[in-house]
């Protein structure tokens, strides 16, 4: 079956989730991927939103975290403080789905401004809850459009910490857990070396040569370990299109 880049991104992210994980989802593709994980790969996982909807039914895909549908059929209908208490709970494997304007080789994120902070060429809404999620969750999965201007050697502004300078620098800075697990883009899936914490290409999508991923990355990327990703199956696409986003609110 034919599929779009958004569809393979949502499915690739969903495949990274373990059954029973606790999924913190933001607006857009993050929300779609968390719902895909819950519906297809991890039925015992729990999805929750920073606006306080914890374990909703997700019979209808919300458009944003402020959409009343995030509260539909919840196990707990609460607020921001309780949602973040779940996020930081040390006995839970909480996975945060995040996005940003820039990312560097160690998974540090910029969602604040481009250029000089006081005279930026572009200013964005900021990290919001992403800073807390990147700092305190068990791990994070990051969504990015794969462009050289977004994959930069050093972010213009550090909005949310990744592996900082690599190695054990995150631990030394006081972050006792967490860190980016994977970066899912429209070209493939990146992960981080266990020791150096430097980003490498783990999967490239069918029809996307690894060299194309490197050409769209603004720093050297190890592509030697990369393998071709499994294409979305008819079963996965049917559930995604028929049950999760039949109106194509996020798929477009």
Image (spheres, helix red, strand yellow):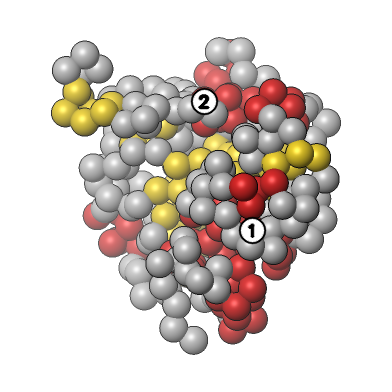
CA–CA distance between discs 2 and 1? 22 Å
The residue positioned farthest toward the front in the image shown: 68
Give how far across and how far down residue 205 sits, in percent.
43, 68
**Front label number (2 vs 1):** 1
Residue 48, disc = none
Tell me, yes or no, if residue 173 can be seen here: yes
- Apparent side of residue 156 relative to residue 171 in the rendered image (left or right): left
Tell me, yes or no, if residue 224 can be seen here: no
Residue 131, disc = 2
Q: Residue at x 35, y 69 (%)?
A: 208
- Apparent side of residue 39 relative to residue 180 in the rendered image (left or right): right
Counting labels gives 2
Residue bearing mark 1: 35
Q: Earlier in the sequence, mark 2 or mark 1?
A: 1
Give how far across and how far down residue 160 sits, in percent.
47, 26
Of residues 79 and 176, which is closer to you in this image? 79
Q: Residues within 10 Å of mark 2 (few under 14, many from 20)?
A: some
Q: Residue at x 36, y 30 (%)?
A: 125
Residue 26 falls in image quadrant? top right
Q: Is residue 237 above or below residue 131?
A: below
Give how far across and how far down residue 138 sits, in percent.
68, 34
Say which element carries label 1: helix
Q: Residue at x 62, y 35 (%)?
A: 51
Which image quarter holds the C terminus?
Answer: bottom left
């Amino acid at each position: 079956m034919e599929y779009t880049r958004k569809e393979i991104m949502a499915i690739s992210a969903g495949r990274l989730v373990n059954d029973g994980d606790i999924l913190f989802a933001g607006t857009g593709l993050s929300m779609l991927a968390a719902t895909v994980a819950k519906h297809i790969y991890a039925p015992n996982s729990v999805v929750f939103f920073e606006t306080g909807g914890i374990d909703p039914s997700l019979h209808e895909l919300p458009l944003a975290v402020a959409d009343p549908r995030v509260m539909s059929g919840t196990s707990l209908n609460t607020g921001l403080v309780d949602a973040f208490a779940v996020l930081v709970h040390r006995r839970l494997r909480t996975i945060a789905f995040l996005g940003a304007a820039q990312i560097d080789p160690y998974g540090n994120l910029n969602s604040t401004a481009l250029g000089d902070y006081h005279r930026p060429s572009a200013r964005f809404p900021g990290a919001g809850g992403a800073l807390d999620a990147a700092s305190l969750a068990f791990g994070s999965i990051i969504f990015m459009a794969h462009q050289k201007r977004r994959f930069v050697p050093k972010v213009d502004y550090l909005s949310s910490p990744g592996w900082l300078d690599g190695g054990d620098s995150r631990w030394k800075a006081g972050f006792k857990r967490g860190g980016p697990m994977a970066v899912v883009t429209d070209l493939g899936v990146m992960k981080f070396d266990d020791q150096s914490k430097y980003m490498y290409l783990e999967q490239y999508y069918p029809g996307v040569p690894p060299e194309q991923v490197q050409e769209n990355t603004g720093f050297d990327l190890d592509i030697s370990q990369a393998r071709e990703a499994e294409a979305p199956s008819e079963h996965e696409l049917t559930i995604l299109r028929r049950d999760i986003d039949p109106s194509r609110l996020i798929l477009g």
